[in-house]
Amino acid sequence: MLKVIKNRFEQGCKTSSYPKEPITLYSRYRGLPIVNKDCPKIVAVQCAQICPQEAIDPERLLIDLGRCTFCGQCETVENGTFVRFSQNFELGAANRQDLITDGQLPDLAAHAKAHFKKLFGRSLQLRQVSAAGCNACEADTNVLNTPFFDLSRFGIDFVASPRHADGIHVTGPVSMNMKTALLTTYEAVPSPKVVIASGCCSISGGPFYGSSEIIGDLNSILPVDLYIPGCPPHPLTTLHALLKFFK
């Protein structure tokens, strides 16, 4: 016991001070893409042609973050003439159309539903549902429970039963085999309840976009309140979205 106390004293507090203090991610992290509106159309067309997700609109010079997997292919064309990826991890949005962007996103707090605060107070319980995900989104969500992020200090927890939850946090493209289970879980959550679509798979289908074996758009079967794009979303992206929207 004395050794444990000694180790704790030597190590100090490992929990991040975010959001009270800003945090800088590794230089190779790809965050919010910034589009060059003066980019020649031919370059934008080249980027659209190599985009595996069909996430680029070369006519309007926009990127759909709901489809983007942040592979970085478009950034390699003409040395990033069309787009460059910033280190901004604040990607959450309340409306699907807001994710179709040139690098500007509305303030999530301004879009938050004010009654959520009144209903849930300082506590938010979520049931995580992996609807045929690859486990990347799930793994980066689980990281929020580690000492570095310590999600529970904000009054936010993931619970085992939907009957104890305020909403569901959905990852994965929602395969046909998971549709019934997902809807049953949603129905088990007491009203009022929230729905969070996390990762490009649940938002648009991600790499499985267009497949007949998936739903590919969570909002087509459930009313989505919060979108968290990414493949997978960085833990800080999820944390920022939850805090801004609900707190």
Image (tube, rainbow, N blue to C red):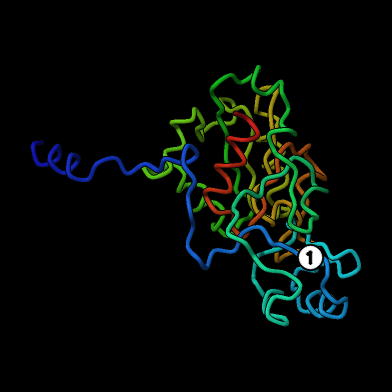
Viewer-proximal residue among 69 and 9: 9
Viewer-proximal residue among 236 and 36: 36
- Residue 99: x %, y % from top left: 77, 52
Could you tell me which residue is drawn at 51 percent across and 35 percent down?
Answer: 158
What is the residue that sits farthest to the left in this orientation? 2
- Residue 187: x %, y % from top left: 70, 30
Residue type beneath disc 1: Ala
- Residue that numbered label 1 is attached to: 55
What is the residue that sits farthest to the right in this orientation? 59
SS of the residue under disc 1: loop
Could you tell me which residue is drawn at 73 percent across and 52 percent down?
Answer: 203
Could you tell me which residue is drawn at 61 percent across and 56 percent down?
Answer: 133
What is the residue that sits farthest to the front in this orientation? 38
Q: Where 168 sits versus 214, above or below?
A: above
- Compared across the picture, whether 82 is left or right of 151 comes to right
- Residue 50: x %, y % from top left: 76, 79
- Residue 212: x %, y % from top left: 81, 62
Dividing the picture into quarters, in which one does residue 169 lie?
Answer: top right
Q: Where 129 sits versus 113, above or below?
A: below
Q: How many marks?
A: 1
**Dot 1: few (<14), some (14–19), or many (≥20) neighbours within 10 Å?**
some
Q: Where 155 sits versus 44, above or below?
A: above
Could you tell me which residue is drawn at 57 percent across and 33 percent down?
Answer: 126
